[in-house]
Image (cartoon, rainbow, N blue to C red):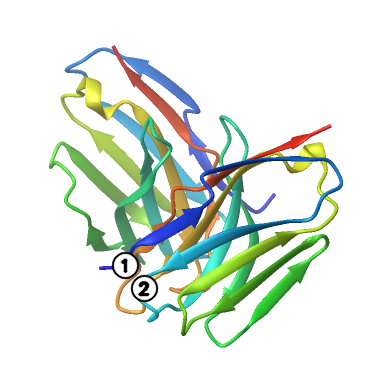
């Protein structure tokens, strides 16, 4: 199946831990994104990468570090997790800006 | 700064009715506009993508229109069904970068 896939789907962890979320797309898209959906269901961009190069870093704490080993993968590493990081994180991809976006099914992160 | 507003925030209608969801944006310099559907606890499913040069797109019972000059889009759902119950989000990518800005969504509930 052609898709954007994220792992894990659910992640429960304690404050202060470091965790990673992985994202892979097999659509051949050049651009990948991380979005955060908060408790009020508002979606906001965090990062975008185009062909492994960081394009957008949207005022995200530097505890969040994206890594793109190749254009099909964009992982999100979070250091020193805080309660406020609890949210659903969505990965997305697009062939080019304006081509439309395909989203993954999300990773629900709960920090306790 | 682009702002995307969706009205109403929530809507309940009896099954079988036709309905219109509204999306407005403040900066008309957009590549396109995309409508998504999000079911509770799920990811985003793309419904329709309208390029900036287009006026409307249709898929089955869904019709989306775009009026760039007035900064508006509507999503028309014909003959609504209980399975249409979900949150509907509109999103616009900006010409200047890869960011897409989401509205806060309209929560739709179709009453059987």
Instruction: Locate the C terminus of chain B and report the quarter of the image it occupies.
Output: top right
Residue appearing at x 28%, y 11% in the figure: A112
Circle 1 packing at 10 Å, graded few (<14), some (14-19), many (20+), is some
Q: Quadrant of residue A55?
A: bottom left
Disc 1 + disc 2, Cβ < 8 Å: yes
Q: Secondary structure at mark 2?
A: loop
| Numbered label attached to residue A17 | none
Q: Earlier in the sequence, mark 1 or mark 2?
A: 1
Residue B74 location (% of width, % of height): 61, 66
Instruction: Locate the N terminus of chain B and report the quarter of the image it occupies.
Output: bottom left
Residue B86 location (% of width, % of height): 65, 40
Q: Which residue is mark 1?
A: B2
Outermost bottom residue: B53
**Is residue A50 or residue B89 the one in the foreground?**
B89
Residue appearing at x 81%, y 58% in the figure: B78
**Is residue A88 or residue A71 the one in the foreground?**
A88
The reply, left or right, for residue A16 in relation to residue B70 is left
Please state the chain letter of the residue tagged with numbered disc 1 in the rendered image.
B
Q: Which residue is mark 2?
A: B94
The reply, left or right, for residue B74 in relation to residue A29 is right
In the rendered image of this protein, does residue B42 appear above or below residue B45?
above
């Amino acid at each position: 199946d052609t898709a954007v896939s994220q792992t894990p789907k659910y992640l429960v962890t304690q404050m202060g831990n470091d965790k990673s979320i992985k994202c892979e797309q097999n659509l051949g898209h050049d651009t990948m994104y991380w979005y955060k959906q908060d408790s009020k269901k508002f979606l906001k961009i965090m990062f975008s990468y185009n062909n492994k190069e960081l394009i957008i870093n949207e005022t995200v704490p530097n505890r969040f570090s994206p890594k793109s080993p190749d254009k099909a993968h964009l992982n999100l590493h979070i250091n020193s997790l805080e309660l406020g990081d609890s949210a659903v994180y969505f990965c997305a991809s697009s062939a080019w800006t304006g081509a439309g976006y395909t989203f993954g099914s999300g990773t629900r992160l709960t920090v306790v | 700064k682009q702002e995307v507003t969706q009205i109403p925030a929530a809507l309940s209608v009896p099954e079988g009715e036709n309905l219109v969801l509204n999306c407005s944006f403040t900066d008309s310099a957009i590549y396109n506009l995309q409508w998504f559907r999000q079911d509770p606890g799920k990811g985003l499913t793309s419904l329709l993508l309208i390029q900036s040069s287009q006026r409307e797109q249709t898929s089955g019972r869904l019709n989306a229109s775009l009026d760039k000059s007035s900064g508006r889009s509507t999503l028309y759902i014909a003959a609504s069904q209980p399975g249409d119950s979900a949150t509907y989000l509109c999103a616009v990518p900006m010409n200047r970068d890869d960011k897409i800005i989401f509205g806060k969504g309209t929560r739709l509930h179709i009453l059987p």
